[in-house]
Amino acid sequence: MLHDQTAVITGSTSGIGLGLAEAFAGAGCRLVINGIATPEEAEALSHRLRHKHGVEVLYHPADLVDAEQCVSLIRDAERQLGPIDILINNAGIQHVAPVEQFPPDRWDAIIAVNLSAAFHTIRAALPSMQQRSRGCIVNIGSVHGFVASINKVAYVAAKHGIIGLTKVVALENANRGITCNAICPGFVMTPLVQKQIEARAIEAHLSNEEATGQLLREKEPTGRFTAIEDIAAFALFLCSPAASNITGASFPLDGGWTAQ
Ligand code: NAD
């Protein structure tokens, strides 16, 4: 379905990004994957995706805290695999603490990875997309782009920012064959959430299972995690011809969290 297209997916060595990489490779896309990994892990993952799906897969080690490395990710992808058709800004990190105790270096890192990196990659990728009048940009936001939770000041600020970034990029490129949308999940069972469950279990003297139940009951009316595969299927839809008139939108995939 996406044969002969090139996709760059940030933060695709784990969690949602890895699920996106599987889905887009499965749809026939050439891929540049990225994320924190040892050279051996990166090679093993690229090799596995390449052979499972029969597509070209390259790993790029850009540390997205750094603006220049964000630009290198895009330039190297273009040089090695050709013009980018699909850019998915997925990489994200979390830190949990009340505002007055929130470490400034964690604030800087979260804003850099979860928000500024998307600006830098989009800024670098747009000229070639504009020249070719084609491109799909998908930003992985969060319910925390719409609503807040305590102790997540940097994450909530960054995710609100992603929704604004998505709208401006969409408007500026509305007549240029380029769409830009955001997918905003509720809880998804990945290492990022697993760490929060473990911290809650320790703090409240609960089992991991009890802490998981508590976390879901607090926020998600369906009482379920959103599946990585469902997020990937939605991202594939946003990159399909059927979604060519959908742009500037931010979609909650959140079990009813933001309906409350
Ligand atoms: P994860 O921890 O499983 O994966 C994060 C990915 O980002 C990894 O590949 C990691 O290596 C990469 N990464 C982190 N810092 C990086 C850096 N400096 N440079 C390059 N890569 C870096 O997390 P996840 O849960 O899959 O999260 C993916 C995205 O989904 C994030 O933007 C997150 O905010 C969002 N999200 C997650 C949930 C959830 O419940 N898990 C909910 C809503 C939104």
Image (cartoon, grey):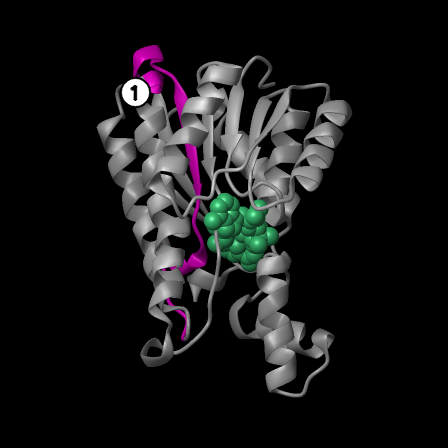
Identify whether 95 is placed above or below 250. below
Q: Secondary structure at mark 1?
A: helix
What residue is drawn where x is 48% and y is 31%? 238
Q: Is residue 134 magenta?
A: yes
Expressed as whole percent of the image width and height from the top left, the position of residue 198 reads: 64, 73
Q: Identify the residue position indicated by label 1 in the image.
A: 127
Q: Which residues are magenta?
A: 128-150
What residue is drawn where x is 58% and y is 25%? 31
Q: Is residue 249 visible?
A: no
Expressed as whole percent of the image width and height from the top left, the position of residue 110 reads: 40, 57
Expressed as whole percent of the image width and height from the top left, the position of residue 27 reads: 64, 24
Identify whether 154 is placed above or below 64. below
Is 39 or 93 nearer to us in this picture? Answer: 39
Give the left or right position of residue 203, taking residue 93 as reference.
right
Quarter the N terminus occupies = top right
Is 10 or 171 nearer to us in this picture? Answer: 10
What residue is drawn where x is 47% and y is 43%? 63
